Image (spheres, grey):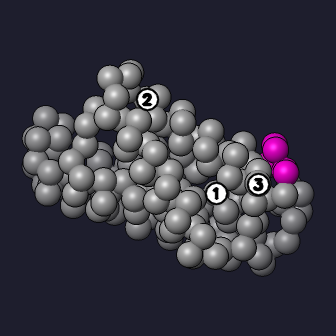
Amino acid sequence: MNIPLIAFILQGIPELIAVVTLAFVIVRIPLNWKRIVVIGSVIALISYTVRLFPIPFGVHTILQVVLLFLILTWFGKGDFSLSIIASLLSFLSLGIMEYFCLSLLMPVFGVNPEELFSNLLLRIIITEPQVLLMFAFAYMFNKFTKRRGNYNEFF
């Protein structure tokens, strides 16, 4: 599925930067914004390129999860289990936030799914709150984990 370049820049890249931010927080990799922006942008660019090919929808998401896992493993000093959990949880969080934002904002704007996908500006406007929520969630989770200590202290 081909997406317009403007949607890639205003929606795809920020979305992946937010996902990478949350994953870094979960794995407890220091938040180096330059690194996070580059990683999120590269994963988004690879995903955008893959979506240009006639392959089944969803393959790009699997690729994103795998790429994020490999990057987290590399920067997280080889913690495989935490890296896969962080990768999966980050994309699951994105999906949940996307569902709630679309469920709440589509009725507010009075649009149905067909209108949403045909109106590029509206699609970008309605999907931006989920990106902001991802950053807010990553920020709050980062503050919580710094205050609480190790993950095994949560339970």
Magenta stretch containing residue 81, yes or no?
yes
Q: Secondary structure at mark 1?
A: helix
- One can see residue 105 in this view: no
Q: Residue at x 22, y 57 (%)?
A: 6
Magenta span: predominant SS is helix
Give the alpha-carbon distance from disc 3 to disc 1, as whole Å: 13 Å
Location of mark 2 (residue): 58
Q: CA distance from mark 2 to mark 3?
A: 25 Å
Q: Viewer-proximal residue, 9 or 30?
A: 9
Q: Quadrant of residue 13?
A: bottom left
Check disc 1 and give the amino acid type: Ala
| Secondary element at image label 3 | helix
- Which residue is labeled 3 in the image? 74
Location of the C terminus (image quadrant):
bottom right
Q: Is residue 143 left or right of residue 152?
A: left
**Mark 2 or mark 3: whose residue is earlier in sequence:** 2
Q: Which residues are magenta?
A: 78-82
Q: Quadrant of the N terminus?
A: top left
For label 1, the residue is 23
Please tell me which residue is depicted at 70% across the width and 46% down the height of the picture: 70
